Amino acid sequence: MSNAAPNALSDPATDATALPLIGAEAEPCCPPLTERPLTAEEAVRTAAMFKALGDPVRLRLFSLVASHEGGEACVCDISDVGVSQPTVSHHLKKLKDAGLLTSERRGTWVYYRVAPTVVAAMGKMLGQHAV
């Protein structure tokens, strides 16, 4: 079954063309920290992202997905992080709930990718212009 998954990328509905959107189209979670103080809503949204990444297993899973060839990873390729498969699923759900990952089921496997603009948006928020 997993042999059919690479062919799914040719389908426009599953095409990974959204991943390169790092430029002006990236909508940051909030403005750069050096631009103005965060609103309460922006602080809540941003804190949820950083809280999700504050766990070493989640940070490792996020890194495995982000750095995986093709910009997405099957759960079968990223489950060896020193915890049980149910714990991996729990952490992946937390990353999805925080808006850091998206997923797509293909047959029996689930494929994860970093939400299209999240890395660029977090980078902008942290203020590349900070002194």
Image (cartoon, grey):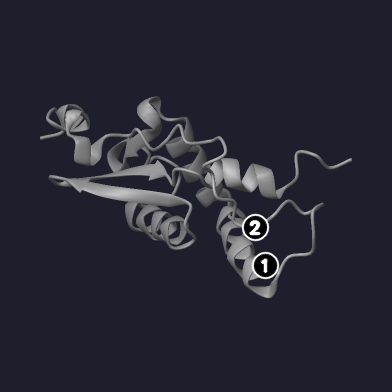
Q: Residues within 10 Å of mark 2 (few under 14, many from 20)?
A: many
Residue 58: where, in percent of width, then height? 51, 51
Mark 1 or mark 2, which has the lower sequence index?
A: 2
The residue lying furthest to the right in this view is: 131
Residue 73: where, in percent of width, then height? 34, 36
The residue lying furthest to the bottom in this view is: 40
Please say if the residues under marks 1 and 2 sit with CB atoms less than 8 Å apart.
yes
Seen in the image, is 84 located left or right of residue 5? Answer: right
Secondary element type, mark 2 = loop
Residue 26: where, in percent of width, then height? 54, 44
Front residue (pair 51, 55): 51
- Residue hosting label 2: 30
Callout 2 amino acid: Cys
Give above or below for 128 relative to 87. Answer: above
Secondary element type, mark 1 = helix
Query: Residue drawn at (45%, 45%), measured in percent from left and top?
Result: 82
Q: Residues within 10 Å of mark 1 (few under 14, many from 20)?
A: few
- Residue hosting label 1: 43
Locate the N terminus by quadrant: top left
Front residue (pair 111, 129): 129
Callout 1 amino acid: Ala
Seen in the image, is 118 located left or right of residue 35? Answer: left
